Image (cartoon, rainbow, N blue to C red):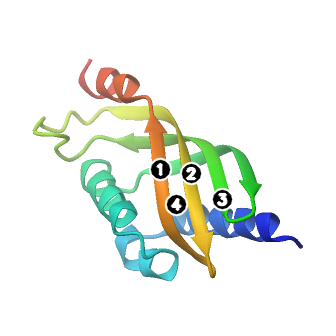
Amino acid sequence: MDRAETNKRFILKYIRALNEAEDKLNILSQYTSDSKLIERIAFLEKAFPRHQVMVDEVTAEASRVIVRARFIGKNLGPVNGMRPTGKKVEVPFAMGYEIQQGRIISHWLITDQLALLVQSVV
């Protein structure tokens, strides 16, 4: 198996582990040292406890993996100063990961923030 395929499988395993975890923050150290990614997941878990990621597409090349997916959760915590609405959201996003020695070392995210706002508030 080549490096890209190994990294692709690693990311799918990571996402599956997050989706199944009772405490997402507790398992992150097994997969990443990227402090910004840990902060992002902590924020999302507070605002959307037990959220899920549904993968639509995965592309990999060498140490980089890109995931196109949907974030699904129920707004039960504050988001940027706004009170929780209790509404369910399903928001498309794309995230890129860089993997070195079997760990996520950096990431980037593109998300439809307008869809998140509309679904959370309206």
* Residue 52 percent coordinates (x, y): 49, 51
Q: Is residue 118 left or right of residue 89?
A: left
Within the image, what quadrant is residue 6 found in? bottom right
Number of numbered labels in the structure image: 4
Amino acid identity at mark 1: Trp
- Answer yes or no: do the residues labelled 2 and 3 have beta carbons within 8 Å? yes
Give whichever of discs 4 and 2 has the lower sequence position: 4
Mark 4 crowdedness (10 Å alpha carbons): few <14, some 14-19, many ≥20: some
Give whichever of discs 4 and 3 has the lower sequence position: 4
Q: Is residue 115 above or below residue 76?
A: above
In the image, what residue occupies the spot 37% across and 78% down? Answer: 26
* Residue 106 percent coordinates (x, y): 48, 63
In the image, what residue occupies the spot 34% across and 41% down? Answer: 74
* The residue positioned farthest toward the right in the image shown: 1
Amino acid identity at mark 2: Gly
Give whichever of discs 1 and 2 has the lower sequence position: 2
Amino acid identity at mark 4: Asn
Q: CA distance from mark 1 to mark 2?
A: 5 Å
- The residue under label 3 is 64
* Residue 22 percent coordinates (x, y): 41, 70
Q: CA distance from mark 3 to mark 1?
A: 11 Å
Of residue 6 and residue 18, the one placed in the foreground of this image is: 6
- The residue under label 2 is 96
Q: Secondary structure at mark 1?
A: strand
Instruction: Report the mark closest to the observer, 4 or 2.
Output: 2
- The residue under label 1 is 108
- Answer yes or no: do the residues labelled 1 and 2 have beta carbons within 8 Å? yes
